[in-house]
Amino acid sequence: MSTSPSAPGPESKGHIEQAGASDESIQRVHAILIREKEEPKEGFTPMPLFLLGFISAMIFLGAVYFVHYRGDFDPLVYDYRFDAAAAKAAASAPKELTPEQIIGKGRILYNTCASCHTPSGMGVAGAFPPLAASEWVTGSEERLIRLLIHGLAGPIVVKGLPYNGNMPAFGPGGGYNWNDAKIAQVLTFIRQEWGNTAPPITPEKVAEIRKAESARAKPWSEAELQPFEEP
Ligand code: HEC
């Protein structure tokens, strides 16, 4: 844009143009400006109290609003089908598991047993007795629950074959320390898997036997469990 021929540069005229203001007039104007300007001060100006109060009030009101409308941080509150009152009631009510859910949980818990009794429940001949079609599993629940809580040691016979190993305790004494629900779930699972068709075991029954045998601190022997053979 500076290439326009009608805009001559300073050298094109050949002389310096007369300035519109003299040194004197410039000094005069500045003297006025300097005089009328406020002297710069050291330090800082505090925030006006009104502004401070206003910002504090806004933060406080924002917090109140947020607490009131946070919806328990549940993303579901944005769903129009969501019934907050019903959800709260459902969360506080004790959860009843369906038989399928109990078996499902038992199946997962059985992974712990499967390392010895094998996933198929067939066991290892001479080392780990089978749980499939075992009279210990499908028979008396009194005997089965006792066996799992405190373990079993010494010679036993399962499906006509002798074993002599150590079945770990899953109650308080052993390393597992499973609660009543877990014990009931895994026992219900092994009683209804691999063709077994024994009735389920409830956590209440496990609790009852745990209480009755609370004084016991060592694994059972086959002879000691004999009295509980009948249901
Ligand atoms: C460390 C290996 C091991 C683990 C883990 C184990 N068991 Fe056993 N279990 C044995 C042995 C060994 C015996 C036989 C004990 C004996 O010879 O006195 C046995 C015996 C049994 C018996 C009685 C005999 C039979 O075969 O019916 C049942 C029932 C049983 N276990 C269930 C379970 C369940 C349920 C679990 C998992 C919660 C489990 N076991 C975990 C090793 C194990």
Image (cartoon, helix red, strand yellow):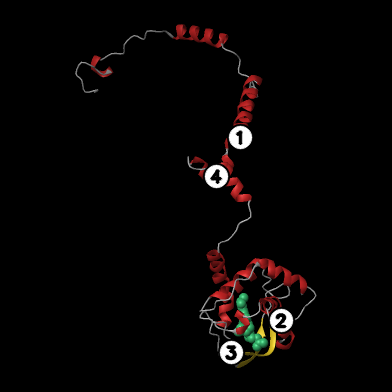
| Circle 3 Cα neighbour tier, 10 Å, few/some/many (<14 / 14–19 / ≥20) | few
| Residue beneath disc 1 | 68
| Circle 1 Cα neighbour tier, 10 Å, few/some/many (<14 / 14–19 / ≥20) | few
- As measured in the structure, the alpha-carbon distance from the residue carrying label 3 to the one carrying label 2 is 18 Å
Instruction: Indicate which quadrant contains ligand 1.
Output: bottom right
Location of the C terminus by quadrant is bottom right
Residue 179 shows up from this direction: no
Point 57% across, 9% down: residue: 35
The front one of 219 and 74 is 219
The front one of 5 and 130 is 130
- As measured in the structure, the alpha-carbon distance from the residue carrying label 2 to the one carrying label 1 is 59 Å
| Amino acid at dot 2 | Phe
Dot 4 or dot 1, earlier in sequence: 1
- Residue 86: x %, y % from top left: 57, 45
Dot 2 or dot 1, earlier in sequence: 1
Ligand 1 closer than 8 Å to the CB at disc 3? yes
- Residue 117 vs 205, above or below: the answer is below
Dot 4 or dot 3, earlier in sequence: 4
Residue 62 shows up from this direction: yes
| Residue beneath disc 3 | 159
The numbered dot on residue 228 is 2
- As measured in the structure, the alpha-carbon distance from the residue carrying label 1 to the one carrying label 3 is 66 Å
